[in-house]
Image (cartoon, rainbow, N blue to C red):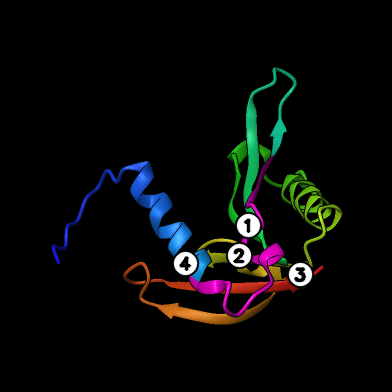
Amino acid sequence: MKITVTMSPKECDLNTISKGIQSFNQRYLDDVIVYEPDTKFAVFAKDENDNVIGGARATAFWNYCILELLWLSEESRGQHAGTKIMDAVEKCARDNGFEYMRTETLSFQAKPFYEKRGYTVFGELPDYPKGHTTYCLIKKL
């Protein structure tokens, strides 16, 4: 056995790992769940010149939608852009059959915003990044 580390893995090697875990999971899950493709989507807030001034990126599979990123430019803050973006993200997730939203936020970011939207903390990673806490949140849609 040879162990290698690479910062630029080959797509075929990554696919081998994915297929391997799918094969293992088949022992415990229905094929419909095992082979369900990821759903990836984004929501954008744009100004009158079509410039992106905020947005969100999400990946969803099984019955969870994972909000990966939410960003608002300084000029879009205070205009309910975050609420409008999250409304669209959650609607897209619901419309595609996902039952839960999951996300992470740092102690200096948007934890109160998510909590106002009905998200609850289910985990904390202290000192990640150093000097801060990462909060893991969930919401039933």
For residue 135, side relative to residue 36 (left or right): left
Closest to the observer: 103 or 33?
A: 33
For residue 70, side relative to residue 4 (left or right): right
- The residue that mark 2 highlights is 103
Tell me where the magenta segment starts and ends, as one range: 24-42
- The residue that mark 4 highlights is 21
Q: CA distance from mark 1 to mark 3?
A: 16 Å
Q: Are marks 4 and 1 in contact (CB under 8 Å)?
A: no
Residue 97 quadrant: bottom right
Label 2 packing within 10 angstroms: few (<14), some (14-19), many (20+): some
Where residue 50 sits in the image (x, y, percent)?
69, 21
Q: CA distance from mark 4 to mark 3?
A: 37 Å
State the SS at label 3: helix
Q: CA distance from mark 2 to mark 4?
A: 23 Å
Q: Residue at x 57, y 78 (%)?
A: 27
Q: Nearer the viewer, mark 3 or mark 2?
A: 2
In the current view of this chain or complex, which residue is farthest to the left?
A: 2
Q: Nearer the viewer, mark 4 or mark 1?
A: 4
Residue 117 seen in this snapshot = yes
- The residue that mark 1 highlights is 67
Q: Earlier in the sequence, mark 4 or mark 3?
A: 4
Where residue 26 sits in the image (x, y, percent)?
58, 72
Q: Earlier in the sequence, mark 4 or mark 1?
A: 4
* In the image, residue 42 above or below residue 140: above
- The residue that mark 3 highlights is 116
